[in-house]
Amino acid sequence: MLTGCRPALTLLLTATALLSPVAAQTLYTSKTAYSTSETIRVTFKEVPLDHEVGGPRYVVVVPASAPDAQTSALETQYLQSDPDGTVVFRALQPGTYQARLKYMSSMGLVQARTAFTVGMSKAVPTPPNPRPAVPAPTPGGAPVQVPVPAQPAGQAILPANPPMGEYAVYQWNGPGGFVYGYRFSLVDSKRYRVRDNEWGTYAYTASSKRLKFLTGPLKGFEGLYYTKGRNADGPTIALSPSGPVVNLESRANGAYQFGFFRPGGVK
């Protein structure tokens, strides 16, 4: 049977940002300048894993003038369960931008950043930046909410069905940020697996984006698959062991568990 996957659901909507920048981690783009038809490739290096920073890590692309504490973004990419890798962002209109690394447990703090332009000069390669600029931490005590990336115009609609594969499940724990709980996989349209060998069945209704776990270790859980708003760029399932999940597109994380899709598996 599943153990430790039904933590007490206490409504905790505020927390103190406790994390400081980690000097070793870096962020850099494949070029300093892109054309308006090119996708933007951002490489990250030596980024601590989710469980080490109290929750998911993600990279946002924003106008260079955007304040560090801004939660909306032109696009957001959640990082897979690796310290090194590359994420790809769609092409942009002419302008000056930054890619910023953040942790969901400390959203007002930029952990690493790199700047680039679009449609303003000839594209040239750029080497890694070993000393990314980072700001001072935001004052403690400020309300913390799950980031709500702006829904870009013309963004492709995600598939009606949540992607098959493995999800890392976290729950909000107040000052402790997001705490890793367990992992599960959607194996096919009817079966799921918790960890490696605990199996069950579920049903999914595409019109409402809702999952219902019918048998197995998550029996009684219900979920809501996000396809726009806060999770448009990182497929996410909000889970509750006590029934239907309300629409959380623009709300604080509340008392739910969150399953973040990990295309490369949870490590």
Image: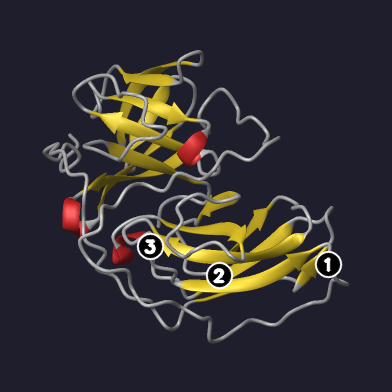
Q: Mark 2 or mark 3: which comes first in sequence?
A: 2
Q: Nearer the viewer, mark 2 or mark 3?
A: 3
Q: Is 57 situated above or below 43?
A: above
Q: Measured from the top left, where is residue 212 in percent x and y?
A: 33, 18
Q: Quadrant of the C terminus?
A: bottom left
- What amino acid is found at the position of numbered circle 1 in the picture? Met
Which quadrant of the structure image shows residue 33? Answer: bottom right
Identify the residue under disc 3: 108
Of 192 and 134, nearer the camera is: 134
User: Which residue: 75% across, 55% down?
Assistant: 39
Identify the residue under disc 1: 120
Residue 8 marker = none
Q: Quadrant of the N terminus?
A: top left
Q: Measured from the top left, where is residue 222 in percent x and y?
A: 30, 23
Q: Mark 1 or mark 3: which comes first in sequence?
A: 3
Q: Residues within 10 Å of mark 3 (few under 14, many from 20)?
A: many
Asked which secondary structure carries label 2, the reply is strand
Q: CA distance from mark 2 to mark 1?
A: 24 Å
Total numbered badges shown on the rendered structure: 3
- What amino acid is found at the position of numbered circle 3 in the picture? Gly
Q: Measured from the top left, where is residue 17 in percent x and y?
A: 26, 64
Q: Is residue 43 left or right of residue 123?
A: left
Q: Is 206 situated above or below 233?
A: above
Q: Nearer the viewer, mark 2 or mark 1?
A: 1
User: Which residue: 29% across, 16% down?
Assistant: 214
Asked which secondary structure carries label 3, the reply is loop
**Residue 165 appearing in the image:** no
Q: Is 214 situated above or below 138?
A: above
Q: CA distance from mark 2 to mark 3?
A: 19 Å
Identify the residue under disc 2: 44
Task: Please say if the residues under marks 2 and 1 sit with CB atoms less than 8 Å apart.
Answer: no
